[in-house]
Image (cartoon, rainbow, N blue to C red):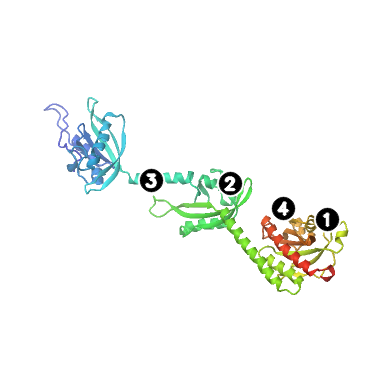
Amino acid sequence: MSASRRSGTTDELGPEGSEPEREGPAGSDLLAALLDGMDAALCAFDADGVVTHWNREAERILGWTAEEAVGRAGFAGWAVRSADAEEVEARLMSAMDAPGRQVNEFALLTKDGRRVLVRTQSAAVRGPDREPAGVYCAFSEVHAQIDLERSIALSEALLEDAGWGVVLVDADLRPAVVNAYAARALGAGRTSVLGRPLGELLSQGVEELESALTHVLAEGAPPAPAELWVTVRTPEGERRRCWRSGFVRLSSPLAEEPVPLGVGWLFQDVTEARQGEQEASLLRFRTQQLHRAARAAAECENPAEAVTVHLDFALAGFADHAVIDRVAEGGAETDRVRLVRIAETPSGAPGPCRLDGRAGLPVLYADGHPALQCVERAGTVRAGAGSLKGDAAREWAPARQWPQGTVHALCTVLRSRGRTLGAVTFLRTSHRTAFERADAMYAEDVAAHIATALDLAALLPEEG
């Protein structure tokens, strides 16, 4: 199949009788062979717009053979729609008068009537006098090119403008690419997190995250997003965050067998929403506990038992231990407040709160004890072991007459009918977080019920 309508020409080296013609392909045949061997679709037009060349790749894309294409005037009526023919011809032939190459995109027609989007590069063909003698045009389908450009554009948009975090994690579970959102969430710059172990960026939750990434590398993406609670290390300190995360496995498209490149991790910070839900759920639970305690206390014949009932219901999900201290008789007449233990939870084994047998004997609280401060201020006092380590941390609780292992305390005053009756102290061990403002509000509600029960019982120290 010829790529040109010219064939069979000779290449004479001199006048007749001179050196004989060498064997080999004629000039036009050589040109046709070169054009047919190229991967790009090529065609050419003379100055009048008539097709002069048409190679095999052009035939493959559009289905028209060289015999069918060469000699036609332009693409009108066969390779483009009639409505588009004038514009396409004008844009192609404009290359004769323009310097360099002209790039255009056209919708051409195949022999079977399908539309094919192609990208063309056209330039002028000049004759021996350097005047434009025609136009050559190279074209290729652009679906793959457009798909690639769209993929690149999508990647750039995700990495620059997305409203969620995008992290590309390599096979060693280290960030290889992060977008601006992810960098802010991780509390670092986009380049400073690259190549670092996740354990250097997160102080808690890293094991769960790495487990998810390892699973995706081995098995593929999970069926649904997962919510991960992590603690992020930042220059301002640690931050507890909840990230709704999705994962996709990345494999090389160039290999015959899937070669893992890493994991695409997409996440969005949903901390505020989840904290709001948790706070609402916690508030509902605590309100229900108060109602249950009130109903159970109403069934107690002895108001003193009602005190321990309120304390037992309050401890559920709130604290590990609790003690109730009452202002000693005559304490108001002295300069120093004295407190007497009347109830406490067992510190050595689980069980309900019980009335203490030491009633009548003041508790040996040192000056400045949180319970004393609570009574003196008629308010709530929070205390904690803080950053104490070693022996100092172990001695912190016993020195304050609290069970071993206590690291957080919340003391709330007991008041009824304008009188300060004592204090209730809630204690937490190291597996719980410190008391917060919402905890103090709940403790004050519990203290109000306990103070009412104490006032009704009119307990004296010696009656404990």
Q: Are marks 2 and 1 in contact (CB under 8 Å)?
A: no
Residue for badge 2: 187
- Mark 3 vs mark 4: which is more N-terminal? 3
Q: CA distance from mark 3 to mark 4?
A: 55 Å
Q: Measure the alpha-carbon separation of dots 4 and 1.
A: 22 Å
Quadrant where the C terminus sits is: bottom right
Residues 54 and 349: in front is: 349
Where disc 1 sits, the SS reads loop
In three-dimensional space, the C-alpha distance between marks 2 and 1, rounded to whole angstroms, equals: 43 Å
Q: Of the numbered discs in the image, which one, if any, rests on residue 367? A: 1
x and y percentages locating residue 180 in the rendered image:
52, 44
Disc 2/disc 4 C-alpha distance (Å): 24 Å
Q: Are marks 2 and 3 in contact (CB under 8 Å)?
A: no
Of the residues shown, which amino acid type is indicated by label 4? Answer: Ser
The reply to whether the C-beta atoms of the residues labelled 4 and 1 are less than 8 Å apart is: no
Q: Which mark is residue 148?
A: 3
Of circles 2 and 1, which is in front? 1
Work out whether residue 62 or residue 79 is closer to the camera in this orientation and state it. Answer: 79
Q: Which residue is mark 4?
A: 387
